[in-house]
Image (cartoon, rainbow, N blue to C red):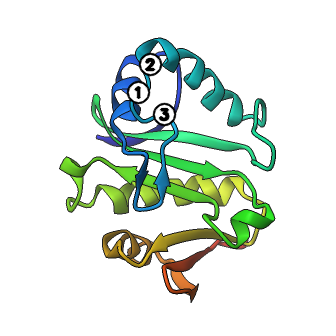
Amino acid sequence: MLYLKPANTDDIEKEYLFVRDIPEDENGFINEYHGISRENFDDALDIIIANSVGERLPVGYVPATTYFLWDDDKIIGELQLRQHLCESLVNGAGHIGYYIAPEYRGKGYGTQGLAMLLEKACDTVPEEEVYLRVQRTNPASLRAMLKNGCYIHHEDESSYFVRFRKEIS
């Protein structure tokens, strides 16, 4: 069964192994914890969890929740939901960033994980639309976004800036 679960201390061993192995920059998904030691991951995880409630944020950052995409008892992806926008996010990464481990790509996990995160975003972000960005060199991620009802808002030489319209009740 596929599900999202926020970063937590109960799953620290599996989270550590997953996060440690994500490259520093994979198609624009930045992982500041690449190669981190197990000893240092305890503190890193405390920061990740604190950030989700707006604590211990670096200057200029907004609260962001890190979720892991699980297939039964295996982590297959990491997804981040920034809870609102600041100017750098409006013209940059937007609300959502995600990474699917290479061995799970091309199997629909990105599309399904993004669908689950968009649902959470609709309940969390105050803006009328959810903002995403994808590099032009990552057509699979763009396809996942479009399959989930997103549309290309605008583009530049390196990226597509994508939006998802929230349901207005």
Q: Amino acid at mark 2?
A: Ile
Residue situated in front as seen by the camera: 56 or 118? 56
Q: Earlier in the sequence, mark 3 or mark 2?
A: 2
Give SS at disc 3: loop
Residue projecting furthest to the top: 39
Q: Residue at x 53, y 24 (%)?
A: 8
Q: Earlier in the sequence, mark 3 or mark 1?
A: 1
Contact? badges 3 and 2 (CB < 8 Å): no
Image location of residue 37, percent across then percent down:
42, 19
Image location of residue 93, percent across then percent down:
60, 64
Give SS at disc 1: helix
Q: Residue at x 64, y 68 (%)?
A: 92
Q: CA distance from mark 3 to mark 2?
A: 14 Å
Label 2: how many residues lie within 10 Å, few (<14), some (14-19) or many (20+)? some
Image quarter (top left, top right, bottom left or bottom right) of the N terminus: top left
Label 1: how many residues lie within 10 Å, few (<14), some (14-19) or many (20+)? some
Q: CA distance from mark 1 to mark 2?
A: 5 Å
Instruction: Answer with left or right where residue 87 lies relative to residue 115.
Output: right
Task: Residue under label 2, please give it.
Answer: 12
Q: Amino acid at mark 3?
A: Tyr
Image location of residue 30, percent across then percent down:
50, 50
Q: Amino acid at mark 1?
A: Glu
Image location of residue 59, percent across then percent down:
81, 43
Above or below — where is 102 with respect to 115?
A: above
Above or below — where is 61 with respect to 89?
A: above
Task: Residue under label 3, please give it.
Answer: 33
Give SS at disc 2: helix
Q: What number is the disc on residue 15?
A: 1
Contact? badges 1 and 2 (CB < 8 Å): yes
Above or below — where is 31 with respect to 92?
A: above
Q: CA distance from mark 3 to mark 1?
A: 11 Å
- Tell us which disc is closer to us: 3 or 2: 3
